[in-house]
Image: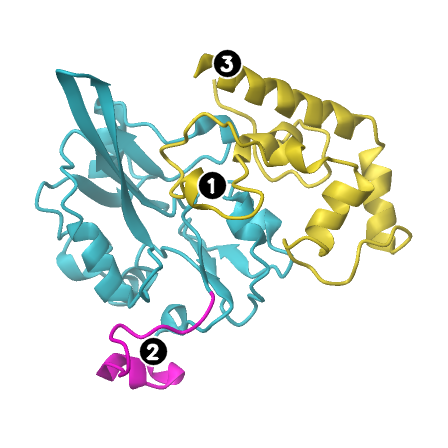
Amino acid sequence: MKIKIIIGFILSFVVGFSALAFNLPSTAKSIKAGKIKVGKVTGLEPGQRFHNIHNKVLGLDCNSCHISEFAPDYLYQKKYKDVGGMGHVDRGVCLGCHKANGPAVTKLYGVAEK
Amino acid sequence: MRFGMVIDLKRCFGCRACVAACKIENMVQPGNFWNFVIEYEQGKYPNVRKIFVPMNCMHCENPPCMKACPEKAITKNEYGIVLINYDKCKGRKYCIAACPYGVIHFIDKERTFYEGHKIPYETLPPEAKHPLHRKKPCIAEKCTLCWHRIEKALKEGKKPGLDYDSSPACVPVCPANARFFGDLDDPNSEVSKLIAEKRAIPLKREYGTKPQVYYII
């Protein structure tokens, strides 16, 4: 169990670090200005904007987010084994970049309270 | 005024009366839930106990679903309740991807409660329903904290949470009195007192979402 958590942590660190390698604000600006083509369909499916931005533009590999060996998250309704395709994505992976003090432009989450 | 909820996990025994009440009150179609209970086991035999965690929208102060929505279909009203505008929602599912609690559901197609025929409510035209109940296929849906009830109570000059009709449907039906609803900004409200005295905490604080649903663990 501990090993799985450590692997999860390392992978989210790698994801965050690889995102840092880009100049994310200027990349986001270029996407919004249409200089970088990410498709016109806004959606989560592969081939749509979400995957085009994360996978094709930022270069995140499928396994960066779709980790099969997450520590079980009892507070998340979906169980990983029930999900088809590439599998469930732990929101902890998103948190790495999308927190208030993270590198991503879209600050979805706040800062953890102490 | 900022409405919130406190759920006492020490009292909850997983009967799912809240789930059923929510289903009926909001006519949530089969397969989807605005309110559900997660259960898991803790400890090792023979010292084992079962934990029940009722989950609904946390109505976060800092809602990631609202920020993620490309259509700006999710808003937070002046009472702190996060609502989806079904007319604006285009079913992009970004809100579902951003929510760390997994409480937003997607309506892929219209499903009736009974296969082959509609119950009288299902035959009503959308105009006859509250805007938050005018659901349609290809949109996201979630708990509204029974805003239709709270809104009505406020219009009638009542204080929400004091009686059956002015509380979210899941609260008064709880046989264990494990759910409490009220104004988080009022230090004398039951919810504020419980948070202070019983040290109720929100879930997944690491996300910085500042949920308005607290749990007594």
Residue under circle 2? B129
State the SS at label 1: loop
Determine crowd level at label 3: few under 14, some 14-19, many 20+ residues with C-alpha closer than 10 A. Answer: few
x, y percentage for residue A67?
57, 31
- Residue toward you, A67 or B160: A67
Which three-letter amino acid code belongs to the residue tagged 3?
Answer: Ile
User: Which comes before the other along the chain, label 2 or label 1?
Assistant: 1
Coloring applied to the structure: by chain
Q: Which SS does the magenta portion mostly show?
A: loop
x, y percentage for residue B151?
32, 63
Residue at 51% across / 31% down in the picture? B207
Q: Is residue B121 located in the magenta-colored stretch of the structure?
A: yes
Position of the C terminus of chain B by quadrant:
top left
Residue under circle 3? A3
Write down the colour of chain B.
cyan
x, y percentage for residue B129?
34, 78
- Residue toward you, B203 or B19: B19
Residues indicated by labels 2 and 1 sit on the same polypeptide chain: yes
- Separation of residues labelled 2 and 1 (CA atoms): 28 Å
Write down the colour of chain A.
yellow
> Would you place residue A45 above or below residue A113 in this image?
below
| Residue range highlighted in magenta | B108-129
Which three-letter amino acid code belongs to the residue tagged 1?
Answer: Glu
Which three-letter amino acid code belongs to the residue tagged 2?
Answer: Lys
Determine crowd level at label 2: few under 14, some 14-19, many 20+ residues with C-alpha closer than 10 A. Answer: few
